[in-house]
Amino acid sequence: MMKVATVTVNPAIDETVTLQQLIAGEVHRASSVRFDVGGKGINVAACLADFGLDVTATGFLGQNNIRIFEQFFTRRNIKDYFIRRVGSTRTNIKIVDEARTTDINLSGDPVTSQQLQQLADVMDSFCGPQWLVVMAGSLLPHMGSTFYADQVARMANQFKMVVDCSGDGLQAVLKAQRLPYAIKPNIDELSQYCGRFLTDMTEILSIARGLISRGLSLIVVSMGADGALFVTHEMALQARLKTDNIESTVGAGDAMVAGMIAALCENASLDRIARLGTAFAVGKLGLHGPKLPRKDILEYLARAVECRQVA
């Protein structure tokens, strides 16, 4: 049985404020506010725990506002290997009105070389072919854009690594000599890698297969309303599932990664990976916060996913 660990170096507390209409420069009265633990790796861990899998989570957390995270990990039965450090974990603010969501994200406190060594020591404990490690989310100041790429180069022989990040961190991973086991860029991120906007499925598939030929085992390209493209050495599938039940799009991509991981833990086929990844993402759309519907609902959604082979 595969063991799963997630790494979130820059988690957050997500403060979601709902109001009728956001008008710049005006005073507003909120209709509701909620606080959720956040960070891509934590979201992935939460989804996997909801699906009934054992999962370990690590990264950095500030001691000043640690309680909300510790309560969350206990409630969701997530093994907590986070490194505590002086200060507070950042708070990200999401302002939701009837038309749109406005995000205000803080960068987080800089990390020290000693703290990075502590994290490396924790990651070294996830050693062996039975481990699958997910590194996800933004990086802290002073980490450098090559952090994820460096970890892949250092540890890819020890366990399967899945990377889900964006910006310069993702570009460094894609351009590195050693690639991880799997990645999940969206179409805009893959376009940035290519230096041009990708719209043609044939071209998208060609780019994905090029990365597979360089060492990736699995690449998943999320494409919004067009679903997602799942590509391995053997085949490529486009998966879609329409839904009108959308409460929040926050964390849907993280849920897709969790679905991929859950299927990989089953040593499943690409069809199962595509179905479960899509089902997790669609199931997450109907809920606020880092959680999924019941397992039977997810399996129902997985059966309903439209999968077609792409040449």
Image (cartoon, rainbow, N blue to C red):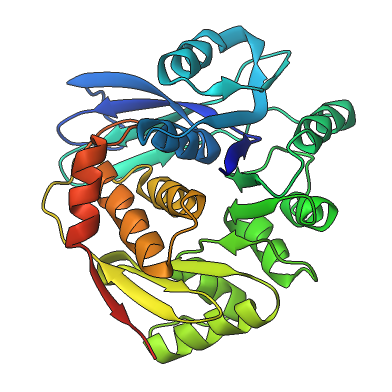
Q: Residue at x 74, y 53 (%)?
A: 145
Please give left or right for residue 62 compared with residue 237 in the image: right
Please give left or right for residue 236 compared with residue 309 in the image: right
Query: Between residues 132 and 202, which one lies in front from this camera angle?
Result: 132
Q: Residue at x 46, y 81 (%)?
A: 235
Please give left or right for residue 303 compared with residue 216 in the image: left
Quarter of the figure that contains the C terminus: bottom left
Query: Between residues 305 and 60, which one lies in front from this camera angle?
Result: 305
Compared with 207, 60 (above or below) is above
Query: Between residues 263 and 256, which one lies in front from this camera angle?
Result: 263
Give how far across and how far down residue 228 sits, in percent: 36, 68
Compared with 66, 266 (above or below) is below
Q: Residue at x 68, y 14 (%)?
A: 87
Q: Report the number of discs.
A: 0
Quarter of the image where one finds residue 8:
top right
Quarter of the figure that contains the N terminus: top right
Farthest front residue?
A: 1
Compared with 188, 97 (above or below) is above
